[in-house]
Image (tube, grey):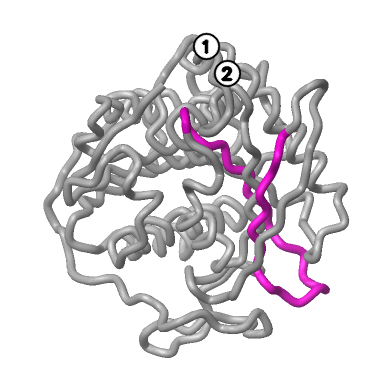
Amino acid sequence: MSRRPAVLLIIAFAVSAVLPEVNASGLVAQLATTNGAKSASTVVAMSKSNVVDYRVGPLSKVGTFKFDTLWINVTRGSRQLRTLVVYPREAPSLHLPVLVFAHGWDNNPVGYLPVLEGWASAGLVVVAPTAPGMAKGLPLVSESQANLEQLADLPVVMSSVLRWHLPVVLDPGEVAYAGHSDGGDAVAAMALNPTYFDLRTRAYFLLAADVNARDGSHEHSNRAPVYIADSFHDEYGNWPFAQRLYALASKPKALVAIGRNETHLSPWVHRSTFTLALWQSTVDFYAWALSHRPVDRLKIVRDLAVAGFGEYTE
């Protein structure tokens, strides 16, 4: 399946299933970005005003940590899942949160390196399996078959990675799933259909996903917070699906509509001050999902207080 662009940003935490009207008013100035990556021994991140304290556990500002990458092979039956791991150079004694990322149709983990590296630089261990049948550079199968296979791959990859002896220590109590486009469809099914629940999950990130028969019939069923984002002018017309997914999800949840004529894919593959603000909002949503602290929820609003995003909370 394909996907689309962006213009307005709405982030909404709600108890109601009724989607609030998107409001572009109140757009405000610039995001303060970090100046270069700090070594992993830097235990806290410094904001522009040099105030220390912008992290829950190891989570911090995008750009705080230097990172490394490695490839591992995960097997599910006959499927060989070549998996990219991007991780912060963190002190070995720290247990780090994990994010398994599902790529979209005719793409692969390398195609998303900017955002994967951004997440790792904020303190996440990012695990991105290649999905045979829908990955760029491999034979493609039918979209429905590929989606089901990817959906089955994701928890197997999570379990395998938690058992691997990696250069960093993973926290099995802090795991989340994210997916873009068709990968977002798989993660939406994991979030909203009890058949596919992974009870270890602390947060879900649905990026330019749509609604299908696997995820559209279980209202308020998610057991973990859900972050939903898409470009307001997604060229594949997915923005209404983002609204529908938001309506299906129970709180805590966020809905983000992305502006500045961003496309279906561009917010997740191009690094700019604008997209850094978006990526930071995902990190802070993960922190809020773990902590449930109002201060972490407010950080998401602050992240998105950048011209080109519209922001709404409740």
User: Are dots 2 and 1 in contact, CB under 8 Å?
Assistant: yes
Residue on which the image places disc 2? 146
Residue 171: image quadrant is: bottom right
194 or 167, which lies in front? 167
Task: Give the residues drawn in magenta, as a range.
Answer: 81-106
Residue 235: image quadrant is: top left
Reply yes or no: does residue 195 show up in magenta: no
112 or 121, which lies in front? 112
Given the image, on which type of amino acid does mark 1 rest?
A: Ser
Check the image and report above or below for 299 versus 36: above
State the image coordinates of residue 173 (x, y, percent, origin top left).
76, 50
Residue 214 visible in the picture:
yes
**Chief SS of the magenta region:** strand
Residue on which the image places disc 1? 142
Check the image and report above or below for 122 versus 309: below
Question: What residue is drawn where x is 58% and y is 12%?
Answer: 145
Q: Quadrant of the N terminus?
A: top left
Q: Quadrant of the C terminus?
A: top left
